[in-house]
Amino acid sequence: MATTEKLPMLVEGHDMLTAELKRLKVERPEIIDAIEEARAHGDLSENAEYHAAKERQGQVEAMIADIEDRLARALVIDPTTLSGDKVVFGATVHLVDEDDKPVTYQIVGQTEADARSGKISFSSPLGRALIGRRVDDDVEVTVPSGDRYYVVSRIEFI
């Protein structure tokens, strides 16, 4: 995946990736030790421990490469430095749904997206529908469960 496209993320997402990278780099020597120990048991063709350790090594190396790539392309955005009257990456958007129920989402990167905690990716259907909207704009979005309708009631940069 050799792309130079910037990857927007919040400070929390960057910190989460950095911590995961550190954890994986600590795991690396442990896997090498497990491979050496399994290799010492003899015949490698029927050595399940060896094959499992080699498979884990491949997974960890791929994850490290992916995280290093994402961190190298990271465009870290602090929402408190933003302002304006449009929904942009990092904004916290207060909406009213079709049942007059208030909902709040923060527009974040794919790394930190978690709809249950009110953080949606800018590339999700709702995230794409919200970008560029202003207070009192109607938003219609098609999601797997059907069409949803919202009205933007407030935009914050917190």
Image (cartoon, helix red, strand yellow):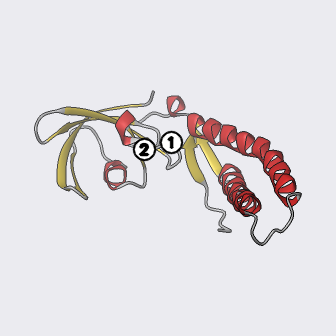
Q: Position of residue 41 (x, y in %)?
A: 85, 58
Expressed as whole percent of the image width and height from the top left, the position of residue 51 reads 73, 64
Q: Residue at x 78, y 50 (%)?
A: 31
Tell me which residue sits at (43%, 50%) in the image.
Answer: 122
**In the image, which disc is placed on residue 88?**
2
Q: CA distance from mark 1 to mark 2?
A: 16 Å
Q: Secondary structure at mark 2?
A: loop
Is residue 111 shown left or right of residue 67?
left
Mark earlier in primary sequence (1, 2): 2
Element class at badge 1: loop
In the image, is 9 to the left or to the right of 23? left
Q: Position of residue 91 (x, y in %)?
A: 42, 37
Between residue 72 and residue 151, name the one nearer to us.
72
Kind of residue at badge 1 = Glu
Comparing 93 with 32, the one in front is 32
**Which residue is located at x 32 percent, y 48 percent?**
130
The residue pinned by badge 1 equals 112
Crowding at dot 1, Cα within 10 Å, few <14 / some 14-19 / many 20+, comes out as some
